[in-house]
């Protein structure tokens, strides 16, 4: 299937820092829109530009950012608002996979819905991964979903991800609508059963 | 072994197990607003899919609404375009929309309960992370992304993994001047901003039981700030009394049948929880935040911890917080000058919040260096407040009295901080740039604490001035 996501490979960009919230990823004033098109240029906008629009020193402002499909982040990335605009902005900026120490729950789920794997390397292994990455920041990094490994410079780091997310990415079913729709009969049956949709009769 | 409300309600709504292993969960009530829904409708149109049960989705407009001049078209063309999109989408798909011209517009998490749409035992989803607010009624309520808004519109279901449940028992007796807002900030201080990942929080214990429904909503509202996607409280007589007679609540004999159903949902006494936490709040002072996430909270009588007191996990963020906030480790926040005071939001924009603040402000004046304003959470809250004369109290003190919406909680309309202004805010997030200015500084606290800070021009311990 065309939607199957098995491996993301390419250079990686590191964004240091923990607890980076979705307001920082995409400030609310840039969500005054009715489509996700064009959100890429606003990713981390207030960190990348000063109030006069002058570019600041920031990993996303480097030449390398333009051809780095992988983003490396820290702990609790994507906390805060449920705005899908946040992963959309990162995806439209050009990222295709994220490696972090932990992710906020709604953010991680939103990433899966876009076919945008967010994988977790835990504990000491994360520190070792960062060291390896820093020793050659331009080397190619691979997020291999089939092997459940991040591969870099001949080294392998196991990653964590909810089994259901992994499976839906590998099977190309991360866009869940079609499968949900295929159970219409069961949905209607449920509607008929729920007390609050049926005047609380039979309770 | 007994079951938790979470498990009972989840199982009741499970339609199927999907190929990924996730559950297909039926969503009983779907709430939408102008920010996270237009792209979902666009995807439906693109795929030629209809809204399966338009009668189970309700819309309002809250995030982009100007609070001063609500005349259409809005001055902000982008905001106008977003509202126009919601108007045409709700018309095209026959979805009820509590638009600006209705008596029921307001913040989505304020209007759901006040209209009686929110009820125990429901699954409630909204493209908004503060949806756990509705959990105060014993519902499973949670925030979702836009792709899930699309899925629910198309199928009235979504794909989801069941969470673990952590019971949080809150005991003790709150001091005067300490509120529900302080209790949830304390819970987040204790359990951290990541502590709730993977969990639903079940709040209970004498303090929670003694809280009114509005106070319970404040607690559940900020579950996500603790990392928990769900927060809920078992329904009781207060829940039923609150709902009775509301517009969308069951009427007549159906209401009595509903109570029987609702009572059966509460967690069983012998429920086994995945985790249990006990918190005593007896000696607690009012809470404030000093940093850049809601876990950077402390009792106002205490000082910011020294950096070496933070764990390796937290130190870098704490350092960044001190830099952004222009504060020092070991410093007390008492006496911190403020320039903006905001009372409102889905956390604290209800009538009881306005009453508490007004009671303090009555006969006093806002400090000359402070811009203070009140944004009621809904048109109904505003109307009720005006009937009680609260607007006059606020205005006499120098507060600006506004129309209903989310306002400066997230600065999507023209209510925004300027430069590095410090805002005493009754809202829920103190993230960098949250209130519209990249260098703006937010201090979270209860509405009464905001009122006290507005008068003094600086942060005070509410207990010493009431």
Image (spheres, coloured by chain):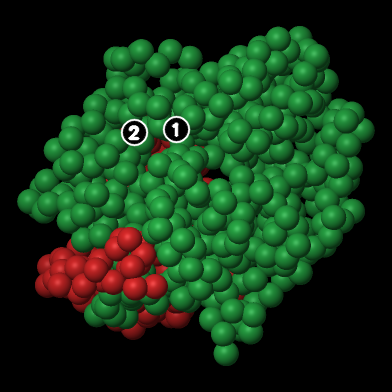
Name the tint of chain A in the rendering. red
Category of crowding for the residue at label 1, using alpha-carbon neighbours closer than 10 angstroms: few (below 14), some (14–19), many (at least 20): many
Asked if residue A48 lies left or right of residue B282, the reply is left
Which chain does the residue under circle 2 lie in? B
Where does the image place residue B6, in percent across and percent down from the top left?
A: 50, 71
Mark 2 lies on a secondary structure that is: strand
| Occupied quadrant, residue B172 | bottom right
In the displayed structure, does residue B367 sit left or right of residue A139? right
Residue at screen point 29% across, 28% down: B83
Quadrant of the frame with the C terminus of chain B = top right
Q: Which sits in the foreground, A106 or A8?
A: A106
Instruction: Left or right? Give the position of B387 relative to B315.
Output: left
Q: Are marks 1 and 2 in contact (CB under 8 Å)?
A: yes
Q: Looking at the colours in the rendered structure, which chain would you say is drawn in green? A: B
Q: Residue drawn 39% across and 59% down?
A: B254
Query: Residue B67 location in percent, x, y?
Result: 48, 20
Q: Name above or below for residue B373 compared with residue B184.
A: above
| B407 relative position to A113: left or right | right
Secondary structure at badge 1 equals loop
Give the residue pinned by disc 2.
Answer: B98
Where does residue A172 sit, x and y in percent of width and height? 20, 71
Foreground pick, B354 / A49: B354
Q: Which residue is mark 1?
A: B106
């Amino acid at each position: 299937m065309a939607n199957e996501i098995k491996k993301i490979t390419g250079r990686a960009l590191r964004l240091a820092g923990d607890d980076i919230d979705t307001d920082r990823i995409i400030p609310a004033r840039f969500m005054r829109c009715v489509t996700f098109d064009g959100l890429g240029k606003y990713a981390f906008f207030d960190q990348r530009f000063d109030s006069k629009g002058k570019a600041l020193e920031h990993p996303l402002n480097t030449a390398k950012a333009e051809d780095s499909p992988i983003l490396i982040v820290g702990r609790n990335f994507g906390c805060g608002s449920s705005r899908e605009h946040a992963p959309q902005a990162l995806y439209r900026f050009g990222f295709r996979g994220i490696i972090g120490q932990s992710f906020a729950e709604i953010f991680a789920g939103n990433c899966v819905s876009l076919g945008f794997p967010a994988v977790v390397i835990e504990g000491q292994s994360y520190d070792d991964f960062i060291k390896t990455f820093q020793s050659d920041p331009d080397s190619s990094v691979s997020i291999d979903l089939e092997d459940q490994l991040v591969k870099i410079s001949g080294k392998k780091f196991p990653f964590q991800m909810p089994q259901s997310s992994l499976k839906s990415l590998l099977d190309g079913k991360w866009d869940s609508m079609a499968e949900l729709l295929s159970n219409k009969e069961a949905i209607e049956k449920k509607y008929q059963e729920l007390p609050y949709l049926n005047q609380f009769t039979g309770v | 072994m007994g079951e938790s409300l979470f498990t009972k309600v989840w199982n009741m709504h499970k339609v199927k197990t999907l190929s990924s292993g996730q559950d297909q969960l039926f969503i009983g009530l779907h709430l939408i607003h102008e920010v996270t829904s237009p792209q979902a409708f666009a995807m439906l149109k693109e795929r030629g899919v209809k809204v399966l049960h338009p009668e189970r989705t309700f819309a309002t407009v809250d995030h982009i609404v100007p609070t001063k001049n609500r005349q259409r078209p809005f001055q902000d063309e982008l905001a106008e375009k977003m509202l126009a999109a919601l108007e045409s989408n709700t018309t095209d798909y026959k979805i009820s929309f509590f638009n600006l011209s209705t008596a029921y517009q307001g913040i989505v998490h304020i209007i759901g309960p006040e209209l009686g749409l929110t009820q125990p035992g429901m699954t409630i989803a909204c493209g908004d992370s503060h949806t756990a607010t509705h959990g105060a009624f014993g519902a499973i309520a949670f925030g979702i992304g836009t792709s899930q808004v699309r899925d629910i519109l198309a199928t009235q279901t979504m794909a989801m993994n069941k969470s673990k449940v952590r019971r949080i028992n809150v005991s003790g007796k709150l001091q005067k001047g300490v509120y529900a807002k302080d209790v949830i900030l304390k819970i987040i201080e204790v359990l951290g901003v990541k502590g709730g990942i993977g969990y639903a929080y079940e709040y209970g214990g004498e303090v929670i039981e003694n809280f009114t429904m509005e106070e319970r909503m404040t607690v559940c509202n900020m579950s996500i700030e603790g990392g928990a996607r769900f927060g809920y409280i078992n329904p009781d007589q207060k829940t039923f009394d609150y709902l009775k007679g509301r517009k969308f609540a069951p009427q007549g004999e159906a209401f009595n049948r509903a109570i029987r159903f609702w009572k059966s949902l509460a967690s069983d006494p012998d429920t086994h929880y995945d985790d249990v936490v006990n918190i005593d709040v007896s000696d607690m002072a009012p809470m404030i935040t000093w940093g850049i996430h809601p876990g950077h909270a402390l009792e106002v009588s205490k000082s910011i911890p020294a950096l070496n007191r933070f764990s390796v996990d937290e130190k870098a963020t704490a350092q960044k917080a001190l830099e952004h906030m222009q504060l020092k480790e070991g410093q007390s926040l008492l006496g911190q000058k403020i320039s903006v005071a905001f009372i409102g939001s889905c956390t604290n924009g209800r009538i009881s919040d306005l009453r508490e603040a007004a009671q303090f402000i009555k006969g006093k004046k806002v400090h000359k260096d402070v811009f203070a304003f009140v944004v009621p959470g809904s048109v109904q809250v505003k109307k009720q407040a005006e009937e009680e004369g609260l607007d006059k109290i606020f205005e006499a003190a120098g507060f600006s009295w506004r129309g209903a919406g989310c306002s400066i909680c997230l600065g999507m309309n023209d209510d925004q901080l300027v430069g590095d202004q410090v805002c005493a805010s009754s809202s829920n997030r103190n993230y960098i740039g949250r209130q519209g200015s990249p260098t703006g500084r937010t201090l979270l606290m209860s509405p009464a604490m905001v009122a006290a800070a507005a008068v003094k021009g600086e942060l005070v311990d509410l207990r010493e001035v009431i």
